[in-house]
């Protein structure tokens, strides 16, 4: 799943406005304009041969930008930590794992809340599975979060907050 798709789904699920998106990026250490955000939120289609049809002016969000956006979202929703100066450093961890962790922190969700979100999307997840995905990379029980898992989380998030 493209990072741009994650942002589109996250924006829809949490009903984030363009101006707030600009502010979230700024809090994460990236300066973008409202027009830049609109270019990031365009969909990339495919033709009948599987080739991407990229809209003119489209901005592809790389992993570093995505991580900065997620860091900014935590700050936007929860506020800066005391003594914090600027954006947190980048970890380089898998984007889908970061997505779950950072949304959990930003929205102050408990593990039970996250299990409920997955349940809304029609996915049964055990506490152990969720715990493995939320662990730090390098831990012996760490598990990388797949695209389908992340997509279902975003679907459940939209159902919980918009449905």
Image: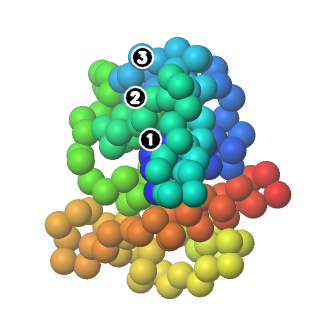
Of the pair 127 and 151, the residue shown nearer to us: 151
Q: Nearer the viewer, mark 3 or mark 2?
A: 3
The quarter holding residue 64 reads: top left
Q: Earlier in the sequence, mark 1 or mark 2?
A: 2
Residue at the spot of label 1 = 70
Q: Position of residue 38 (x, y in %)?
A: 60, 26
Alpha-carbon neighbours of circle 2 within 10 Å: few (<14), some, or many (≥20)? Answer: many
- Secondary structure under tag 3 reads loop
The outermost residue toward the front is 49
> In the rendering, at what x and y percent does residue 74 appear?
48, 39
Side of 146 where 85 appears, left or right? left
Q: Is residue 91 above or below residue 25?
A: below
Q: Is residue 52 above or below residue 149?
A: above
Q: CA distance from mark 3 to mark 1?
A: 14 Å
Marks 3 and 2 sit apart, C-alpha to C-alpha, by: 9 Å
- List the residue tagged with mark 2: 28
Q: Which residue occupies 51% across, 23% down?
A: 57
Residue at x 31% of width, y 57% of height: 94
Q: Secondary structure at mark 2?
A: loop
Q: Is residue 154 above or below residue 74?
A: below
Residue 126: x and y, percent? 50, 84
The first of marks 3 and 1 along the sequence is: 3
Residue bearing mark 3: 31
């Amino acid at each position: 799943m493209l990072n741009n798709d994650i942002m589109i789904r996250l924006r829809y699920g949490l009903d984030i406005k363009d101006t707030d998106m600009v502010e979230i990026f700024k809090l994460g250490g990236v300066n973008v304009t409202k027009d830049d955000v609109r270019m990031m939120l365009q969909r990339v289609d495919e033709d009948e041969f599987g080739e991407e049809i990229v809209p003119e002016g489209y901005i592809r969000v790389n992993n570093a930008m995505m991580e900065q956006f997620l860091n900014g979202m935590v700050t936007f929703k929860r506020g800066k930590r005391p003594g914090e100066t600027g954006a947190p450093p980048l970890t380089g961890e898998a984007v889908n794992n970061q997505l779950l962790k950072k949304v959990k922190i930003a929205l102050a969700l408990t593990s039970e809340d996250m299990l409920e979100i997955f349940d809304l999307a029609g996915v049964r997840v055990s506490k152990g599975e969720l715990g493995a995905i939320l662990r730090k990379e390098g831990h012996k029980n760490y598990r990388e979060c797949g695209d389908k898992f992340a997509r279902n989380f975003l679907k459940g998030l939209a159902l919980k907050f918009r449905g």
